Amino acid sequence: MTMKAHELKNLSLDELKRRLADEEENLANLRFQLATSQLESPIKVRTVRRDIARLKTVLREKERAATTVPAQSTTAAHPEKTEGKKA
């Protein structure tokens, strides 16, 4: 099952982490099957790898959004730079 990024953005951080762990375990199983020539479709490895990348991207975006602090304007941060300037 291929996951869409817009579907993943609606999930919580915990749910994303759980799905990431599940997909990584799935990838390990697929790689084992590939090595033992039991895998019917090697394309499954690529789709799972891409799903993992998609999950990591959305997870990183959400974590960064949670820790981002609003930037202050430069004039508010350095009021001395605006003092003494002639209009």
Image (cartoon, grey):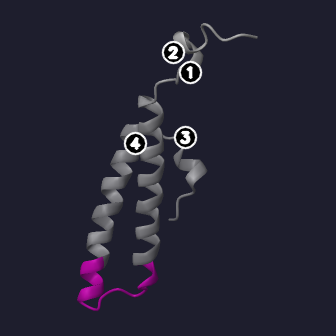
Which comes before the other along the chain, label 3 or label 4? 3
Is 7 displayed left or right of 62 in the figure? right
Say few, some or many: other residues with alpha carbon within 10 Å of mark 3 (under 14 / 14 to 19 / 20 or more).
Answer: few
For the record, the magenta segment spans 31-44
2 and 1 marks in contact (CB < 8 Å): yes
Q: Secondary structure at mark 4?
A: helix
2 and 3 marks in contact (CB < 8 Å): no
Residue 23 higher or lower than 66, as above or below: below
For marks 4 and 1, give the one nearer the viewer: 1
The residue that label 4 is drawn on is 15
1 and 3 marks in contact (CB < 8 Å): no
The foreground one among 82 and 47 is 82
The residue that label 3 is drawn on is 10
Q: Which numbered tag is attached to residue 78?
A: 2
Specify the amino acid type for callout 3.
Answer: Asn
The residue that label 1 is drawn on is 74
Viewer can see residue 12 = no
